[in-house]
Amino acid sequence: MTASLVLGWDRTLLELKMYAREKEAVFFSFLFPIVMLTLFSVIFGSTITGDATNHADHINAARLFLPGMISAGVLLTSFQTMAMSVATERDDGTLKRLRSTPMPPAAYFLGKVGLVAISSLAQMVLLLLVARLAFGVELPTAASAWLTFLEVFVLGVFGGVVLGIAYSSVASARSVTAVVVGPMLVLQFISGVYFQFSQIPSWLQQVASLFPLKWIAQGMRSVFYPDSWQTLEMAGRWEAGRTALVLVAWAVLGLVLCLRTFRWFKRGTT
């Protein structure tokens, strides 16, 4: 067990080095939410749109978009990173070579988890720093808010990792970009990342509710928005309990699918 942990840490460092060298992956999974938060905050400034103008608790654009950008970042650094990297490594023979070495399989997965954990935490910290220092967003002061944040963040990252590994089995290295990025982009548009969720058509809200990104975003909104804004949610409240249950269900489903579908070799090889 100790040997696996040591090898897992070594693998994490290697994964981080390889990740840093992939400029496209770094931009579209790690930096993209930070860039988008900055752009939206500069473009919209203190503008409040839609039903939010009816509330006494006004917020600026940075605070409006922060929960969505954190939520998108969670799945970009976990689900998208895992799906694309595992599919590529399976097709180019990396997984086959690793499987033939003395390295325990657990070390490979610990390295992937370490990569996602470190990159997700770094991205989240940068998003909070940009929002607070550059745009004056008031961060929560209540311990309960940060506990909710931690719960949603951890469940979102864990679910994203196992779902990403499972999803990698449906794509090849050649098709993985389209197969992963396309659905992720659609989910971001309908889950309240780029638009205020209450302004999205109700039938699209129902579709978004089938997937974890909407619930991660809703959980993050409960942390960073004034309590009066919960009336803009589908149920008229934050639904903290349901959010946790949905994210746990997705994490369990992702783990089951991951264990049942993961392959070290691409189809047609042994």
Image: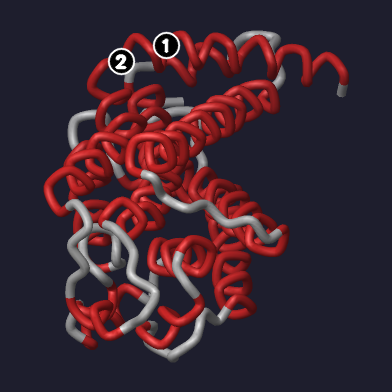
Task: Specify the amino acid type for callout 2.
Answer: Glu
Frontmost residue, 99 versus 45: 45
Whether residue 74 is visible: yes
Relative depth, front residue between 214 and 177: 214
What residue occupies the far right of the structure in this picture? Answer: 2
Vertical side of 269 occupied by 216: above or below: below
Using the image, determine if residue 130 lies above or below residue 208.
above
Q: Residues within 10 Å of mark 1 (few under 14, many from 20)?
A: few
Identify the element where label 2 is drawn.
loop
Image spot of residue 149 (x, y percent) = 59, 56
Residue 267 shows up from this direction: no
- Residue at mark 1: 18
**Horizontal and vertical percent for residue 187?**
27, 61
**Amino acid on which disc 1 is placed:** Met
Circles 2 and 1: CB atoms closer than 8 Å: yes
Task: Look at the numbered disc 1 and give the secondary structure of its residue.
Answer: helix
> Which is nearer the eye, 78 or 130?
130
Q: Residue at x 37, y 42 (%)?
A: 76
Number of other residues with Cα within 10 Å of mark 2, as a class: few under 14, some 14 to 19, many 20 or more: few
Left or right: 237 with respect to 134? right
Q: Residue at x 87, y 23 (%)?
A: 1
Q: Please give the residue where the numbered disc 2 appears in the rendered image.
A: 22
Residue pictured at 60% horizontal, 48% vertical = 259
Q: Could you say where residue 183 lies in the image, as x and y percent from the top left? A: 23, 55
> What residue occupies the far front of the structure in this picture?
56
> Which one is in front, 139 or 208?
139
Residue 112 point in image, percent of width and height: 55, 28
Establish if 225 lies above or below 175.
Answer: below
